[in-house]
Amino acid sequence: MSLRKGANTPVASPVVRVELGWRTGPGAPDVDASALLLTAGGRVRSDDDFVFYNQPVHPRGAVRHEGRRQDGAGVVETIQVSLPSVEQDIATVVLAASTDGTFGRVSGLYIRVLDAVTGAETARFDPVDATTETAFVLGELYRRNGAWKFRAVGQGYASGLAGLATDYGITVDEPAAPAPVTAPAPPPVRLTKITLTKAAPSVSLTKQGATSGAMRVNLSWSARTPPRGRMNKGSGAVRLEDVDLDLSCLWELRNGASGIVHPINNQFGSYDQPPYVQLDHDDRTGGSEDGENLTINLDHTAEIKRLLVFVAIYSGASSFAGLHGVATLHPPAGPPIEVRLDECTVPAPVAAIALIENIDGELIVRREAKYIILPPGILKQQAVDLAYDWGLSWQPASKD
């Protein structure tokens, strides 16, 4: 059902998938989806009620930012909402978008509300009057007499995501004049992030102040939506629940020691001892709330020579051409650093994500996004070794 601005419609589905989409193209700015959980007074209860790329899951699990995928000539970001799980003191779930440019330059912007199980569309809204806005409230899910409805809003903000969030009571991490502190306060929400691209492929962790502490590297992924035929089967379809990706890391220390951290043979590494890199677990379905994570101990930066973060398809797909992965580095200081794996056009089951190098005491993160085709008789991890000249010995192995 297509709605005009201000119109509303009932939402009967208990769990909905909210899709925010737009067309890509030369000079088109990036867009990010977010959600705010508001009380009847129109304010959040705390910063936890803000769900976005840096805080993708609400503490109660009712609202989840599920990342993005390519969809033909466009991009779609998804937020899933379990309406029965939304706490009773929450009256409205605001669905918003922000951009690093202006929405007047964003083509084909829309929001859709779908049944999360069947995929049936409940509502759609296509705003058409955007100009200089840098943030938009596109719609809202709200309670009315014990039932849920969706309203097409289309309210723009010239002050970006920070201005929108502040209006609803979020404490945003922005420079401010020093003020006396009488009691500890929770850390503010960080709205900034760094996306490494071909044009801007590297960033210095040292210059950001990330010289000690734990840096988490998170991997999440989604499957593209295949074309559907009469029998409801798309050629080249990828069943996300069957895909098993292995987040991995080749490591080399300055003393010459080297090796790999990955789930094969339970080589999960170590945080407090060499190699100072540890994999938390093996998510074999993609269904884990937090995905897979590598944690790097930056207290031992002086001992690290280089780390190569990569991902291999263990099963469920033959190439990254059907998958869209996002790796996010969360340093202890500075904004998150994002590398997207969404440009694969070759039959590659392995992708190098980022190379972290200690160059004269400065820790540099460099985007790789390099897709590796396997030569005959070569293992997936071995192919990465050969591509980056790591010099390890290899033999076939599998998971328990």
Image: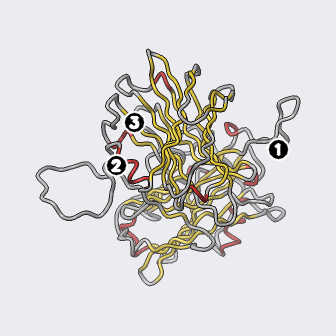
Gap between marks 2 and 3 measured at Cα: 20 Å
Q: Toward the viewer: 310 or 276? A: 310
Q: Residue furthest toward the bottom?
A: 360
Snapshot quadrant of residue 7: top right
Q: Residue furthest toward the top?
A: 145
Gap between marks 2 and 1 measured at Cα: 44 Å
Q: Nearer the viewer, mark 2 or mark 3?
A: 2
Numbered circle sitting on residue 59? 3
Question: Which residue type does callout 1 highlight?
Answer: Gly
Question: Which residue type does callout 2 highlight?
Answer: Thr
Question: Which residue type does callout 3 highlight?
Answer: Pro
Q: Toward the viewer: 48 or 331? A: 48
User: Which residue is tagged 1?
Assistant: 236
**Which sits earlier in the primary sequence, circle 2 or circle 1?**
2
Numbered circle sitting on residue 166? 2
- Quick one: SS at disc 2? helix
Q: Residue at x 12, y 58 (%)?
A: 180
Name above or below for residue 206 compared with residue 342. Answer: below
- Locate residue 286 relative to residue 118 in the image: left or right: left
- Locate residue 276 relative to residue 138 in the image: left or right: left
Give the percent coordinates (x, y) of residue 156. Answer: 48, 48
